[in-house]
Amino acid sequence: MTGTIRTTEHHEELVVLVAADGHAVGTAPKATVHHAETPLHLAFSVYLFDDAGSVLVTRRALHKATFPGVWTNSACGHPAPGEPVEDAVQRRGRQELGLDVHDLRLVLPRFSYRAEMDGVVEWELCPVLAGRVAGVAPEPRPDPDEVAAAEWAPWDAFAADVLAGRREVSTWCREQVAELDRLGPDPAAWPSADPADLPGAMTTRRL
């Protein structure tokens, strides 16, 4: 059911549960999946850049169940069962940030992490993508249920501050920035990864 979010009879958004090898083993309602024993599941992270090469950095809403109030990358989310990852990124960009996302590229197809805050665990196979929004520092229209604040930052300064520990960000963002930095200093020149390296449960239609 490509491009469509599958839900339960109560219209709950579903996430895809995966085995360590990346293959799907079931689904679960998103609202119930994050707790002290969160099962491994499928997600994505995206870094959005404007025409000047700055990256959009966001602060998670203070009432979110996982990592509230933490600064992180542009957006994160969970592909619905059967939903291509690029569709999920564009959906999340519109819903969470009020921005249209273009020129998506897969850059870290095998990224995964496990992190805990206040007894709640995030455990995800979480490929990383880079995308573009038109203009210079366009004003996002964040959903307050998801995003408390957003700002544009030059990538080189942001990455340097994260790597040096001068800027506190989410666990996954810190680990991702370290891997992205190894791809080179210019995000526009990061090589695109092979979609065949994505977890087996993650579908794509264009990347």
Image: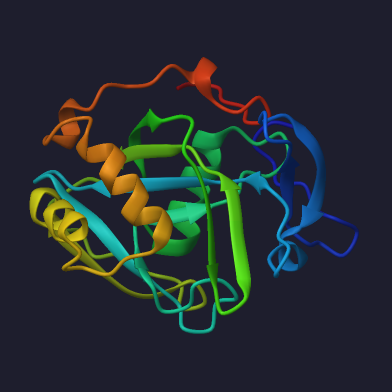
Q: For the point 35% across and 49% down, which residue is it?
A: 175
Residue 171 left/right relative to 29: left
Please state the horizontal and vertical placement of residue 152, each as a whole percent of the image. 18, 61
Which corner quadrant holds the C terminus? top left
Give whichever of 3, 200 is nearer the camera.
200
**In the image, residue 81 lies at what x, y percent?**
73, 40
Frontmost residue, 36 versus 194 = 36
At horizontal 16% and vertical 68% (from top left) the residue drawn is 166
Task: Point out residue 158 in the picture as x, y percentages from the top left corner.
Answer: 15, 57
- Residue 89 lies left or right of residue 184; in this view the side is right
Q: Is residue 188 above or below residue 93?
A: above
In the current view of this chain or complex, which residue is farthest to the right?
9
Q: Residue at x 22, y 27 (%)?
A: 190
Residue 124 vertical placement versus 23 (above, below): below
Where residue 198 sits, quadrant-wise, is top right
Asked where in the image residue 53 lies, by quadrant, the reply is top left
Is residue 40 rendered to the left or right of residue 55?
Answer: right
Viewer-nearest residue: 6 or 24? 24
Given residues 184 and 59, the one toward you in this image is 184
